[in-house]
Image (cartoon, rainbow, N blue to C red):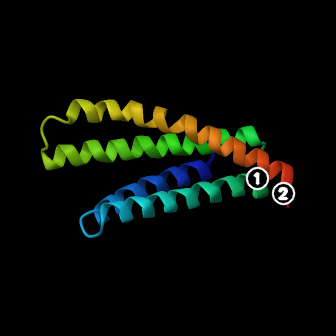
Amino acid sequence: MNRVSLLVALAYVVIGVVFSALLRSVDVQVSRLAAWVASAMVAAAQIAYEHYRLASSPRATALHAAGAVALGAFGLALAANMHSWFAATPGHQSRLLLALVAWPVITALPAFVAALVTALVLARVSPRA
């Protein structure tokens, strides 16, 4: 995993935490949509960076994107566990511990497929700089 993937993973965690905090002040659906749009923009930026600046292969681009998503999901699961511990919400600890493994696994495969398709299309229609 490269430095860009680590920064992207951190961005996903920040987006998740910040937009979940907004749930208290705005409509839930609006906040979730905004978080989804922000995450999609980060993903698109990572794929474009890998394609144009690093000249990565579509497979490498997809692997890096999926790794960033999985690491971001792990970070969000970790944040959820920490929130649960500090907020003293009983009954959720076992499910949240499972999330440390489940969220990265559940998110990595779709992210890999989406990034691979996007990178393959970019490789076909858009020349590298």
CA distance for labels 2 and 1: 9 Å
Residue beneath the point at 42% across and 40% down:
74
Mark 2: few, some, or many residues within 10 Å (few <14, many ≥20)? few
The x and y percentages for residue 85 are 18, 43
Residue under circle 1? 51
Q: Mark 2 near mark 1, Cβ–Cβ under 8 Å? A: yes
> Along the line of sight, which residue is nearer the eye, 108 or 60?
108
Residue beneath the point at 23% across and 29% down:
94
The x and y percentages for residue 128 are 85, 57
Which of the two labelled residues, at mark 2 and mark 1, occupies the earlier sequence position?
A: 1
Tag in front: 2 or 1:
2
Residue 21, located in which quarter of the rendered image? bottom left
Q: Secondary structure at mark 2?
A: loop
Query: Would you place residue 75 above or below residue 33 in this image?
Result: above
Residue under circle 2? 126
Quarter in which the C terminus is drawn? bottom right
Mark 1: few, some, or many residues within 10 Å (few <14, many ≥20)? many
Residue beneath the point at 14% across and 43% down:
89
Quarter in which the N terminus is drawn? top right
Q: Is residue 55 visible?
A: no
Residue beneath the point at 47% across and 57% down:
36
The x and y percentages for residue 64 are 63, 43
> Along the line of sight, which residue is nearer the eye, 110 or 58?
110
Q: Amino acid at mark 2?
A: Ser
Query: Would you place residue 78 above or below residue 44 in this image?
Result: above
Disc number placed over residue 77 in the picture, else none:
none
Left-right relation of 54 to 103: right
Q: Amino acid at mark 1?
A: His
